[in-house]
Image: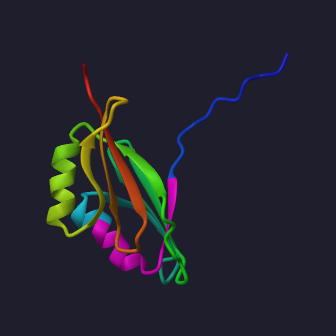
């Protein structure tokens, strides 16, 4: 009998051209905390806020894809949407309620990495 593997956390690894600018965006703009940094100069960081975790990795030649690199579930999409607007994040898709029960929007960080945000709507 094969033992089932228990999965632990999984975190998005976000490539960035400038780790200082990107970390400031997530830390100062979206209230993430810097919990780990590696290298001198820093080439890798772990950022956390509640259950959300992002790993930033320095990739100077990075070109962002046209699809989201991460999906973030929140309890108030409207509030985060307003916060993203206030910090100057590029809004890729405006906020809207989807027929599958999610209020959603997509924003891009300073490197163009797209984060898909969703709030589960209660019926």
Q: Which residues are magenta?
A: 12-25
Q: Is residue 21 magenta?
A: yes
Q: Residue furthest top?
A: 1
In the image, is residue 18 above or below residue 90?
A: below
In the image, is residue 20 above or below residue 25?
A: below
**Residue 56 visible in the shown view:** yes
Q: Is residue 44 left or right of residue 52?
A: right
The quadrant of the image that shows the C terminus is top left
In the image, is residue 50 above or below residue 31?
A: above
In the image, is residue 63 above or below residue 73?
A: below
Between 47 and 86, the residue placed more toward the observer is 86
In the image, residue 68 lies at what x, y percent?
A: 46, 56
Q: Is residue 95 left or right of residue 37?
A: left
**Residue 38 visible in the shown view:** no
In the image, residue 89 lies at what x, y percent?
A: 26, 67
The quadrant of the image that shows the N terminus is top right
Between 123 and 8, the residue placed more toward the observer is 123
In the image, residue 18 lies at what x, y percent?
A: 42, 81
Q: Is residue 10 magenta?
A: no
Q: Quadrant of residue 86?
A: bottom left
In the image, residue 104 lies at what x, y percent?
A: 30, 44
Q: Quadrant of residue 23?
A: bottom left
Q: Residue at x 73, y 24 (%)?
A: 4
Q: Residue furthest front?
A: 99
Between 6 and 69, the residue placed more toward the observer is 69
Count of marks, rendered view = 0
Q: Residue furthest right?
A: 1
């Amino acid at each position: 009998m094969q033992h089932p593997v228990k999965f632990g956390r999984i975190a998005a690894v976000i490539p960035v051209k400038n780790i200082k600018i990107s970390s400031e965006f997530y830390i100062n703009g979206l209230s993430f905390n810097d919990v780990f940094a590696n290298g001198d100069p820093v080439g890798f960081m772990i950022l956390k806020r509640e259950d959300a975790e992002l790993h930033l990795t320095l990739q100077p030649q990075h070109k962002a894809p046209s699809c989201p690199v991460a999906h973030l579930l929140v309890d108030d999409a409207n509030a985060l949407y307003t916060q993203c607007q206030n910090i100057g994040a590029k809004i890729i898709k405006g906020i809207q309620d989807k027929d599958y029960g999610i209020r959603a929007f997509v924003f891009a960080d300073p490197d163009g990495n797209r984060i898909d945000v969703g709030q589960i709507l209660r019926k």
